[in-house]
Amino acid sequence: VAPARITRERPAEVLKPGQRFTVLSWNLQFAGTREHHFFYDGGRAVAVPPEHVARSLAAMRAVLAEVRPDIALLQEVDRGATRTGYLDQLHPLFAVDGAPWSCWLSAPYHRSLYVPHPSHSHMGRVDLHLAIFSRFALRAGQRLDLPRLAEPWIRQAFNLKRALLWA
């Protein structure tokens, strides 16, 4: 169990008993787009060209601006990974014009300084996160480890570190 730091961008509203709110849950798949056949699905692609990441993030920002959920639960947000040009995707997504969010937290789902796989083009630095954006005040957050895959320790060192993020 590891605490997740809550970042407040502006004063947060306190959720009242019985108050209605909206939630969006979205696996962003690191803004990798559907234009590539990635190695983990049997293809050869490892990285995404910066212009593809920018286009994908712009489309995601447009959806978030239109839907404007009170709480957004985001999976697979790259925060400085080699495959997406070392871009921290969290901040452009949080800063959507007109978004109601006042605070956010994130925790790593898969983090490694260097992944030497696949053999034809290494993944390099991986920093994949779970994130929560909230209009309402968050008091605490934690990253909870899920069981590791049953595989040799060397593979575990470079593989996903699946987790839950709660607030």
Image (cartoon, rainbow, N blue to C red):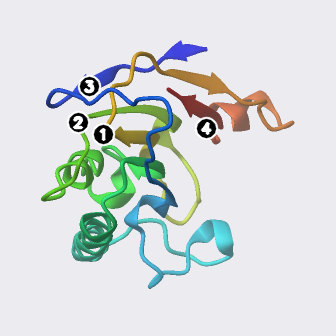
Q: Quadrant of residue 139?
A: top left
Number of marks: 4
| Along the viewing direction, whichever of 79 and 66 lies nearer the viewer | 66
In the picture of the structure, the residue carrying the numbered disc 4 is 158
Task: Tell which residue pokes out farthest to the front in this image.
Answer: 18
Task: Name the side, left or right, on which 72 lies relative to 142.
Answer: left
In the picture of the structure, the residue carrying the numbered disc 3 is 7
Is disc 1 placed on a helix, strand or loop?
loop
Q: Amino acid at mark 3?
A: Thr
Q: Is label 2 or label 4 in front?
A: 2
Residue at x 25% of width, y 72% of height: 62
| Along the viewing direction, whichever of 153 and 93 lies nearer the viewer | 93
Which numbered tag is attached to residue 135? Answer: 1
Is disc 2 placed on a helix, strand or loop?
loop
In the picture of the structure, the residue carrying the numbered disc 2 is 102
- Cα separation, mark 3 vs mark 2, equals 9 Å
Task: Name the side, left or right, on which 88 lies relative to 4.
Answer: left
How crowded is the residue under tag 3: few (<14 C-alpha within 10 Å), some, or many (20+)? few
* Residues tagged 3 and 2 counted as in contact (Cβ below 8 A): no
* Residues tagged 2 and 4 counted as in contact (Cβ below 8 A): no
Q: Is label 3 or label 1 in front?
A: 1
